[in-house]
Amino acid sequence: RVEEAYIHCSKHIPLMQKRDKKIHWGTDDEKLKGGDFFNAKNCDPDPSA
């Protein structure tokens, strides 16, 4: 019996209307996933680390 469940990504929530873009389910391809969402590559490293 399931008490709680969580969805880690909005792409797994079914849409209630048609969309033009194709969703690549379960991919590990950075380009298809959208890449660096938080733009971490261009941030300065944390000086306290």
Image (tube, rainbow, N blue to C red):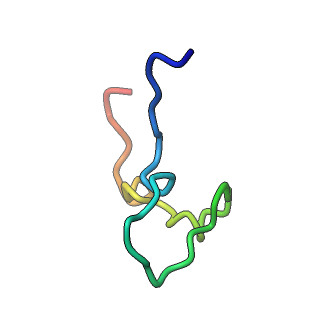
Q: Quadrant of the N terminus?
A: top right
Q: Tell whether 24 sits left or right of 36.
A: right
* Residue 46 picture location, percent across and down: 34, 37
Q: Tell whether 11 sits left or right of 31.
A: left
* Residue 37 picture location, percent across and down: 41, 59
Q: Residue furthest front?
A: 1
Residue 6: image quadrant is top left
Along the viewing direction, whichever of 30 and 24 lies nearer the viewer: 24
Residue for point 38% across, 66% down:
16
Residue 42: image quadrant is bottom left
Along the viewing direction, whichever of 48 and 4 lies nearer the viewer: 4
Q: Tell whether 43 sits left or right of 13.
A: left
* Residue 4 picture location, percent across and down: 44, 21
Q: Is residue 25 above or below residue 1?
A: below
Along the viewing direction, whichever of 32 and 8 lies nearer the viewer: 8
Q: Quadrant of the C terminus?
A: top left
* Residue 20 picture location, percent across and down: 46, 84
Residue for point 38% across, 59% down:
39
Along the viewing direction, whichever of 8 and 30 lies nearer the viewer: 8
Residue for point 51% across, 52% down:
12
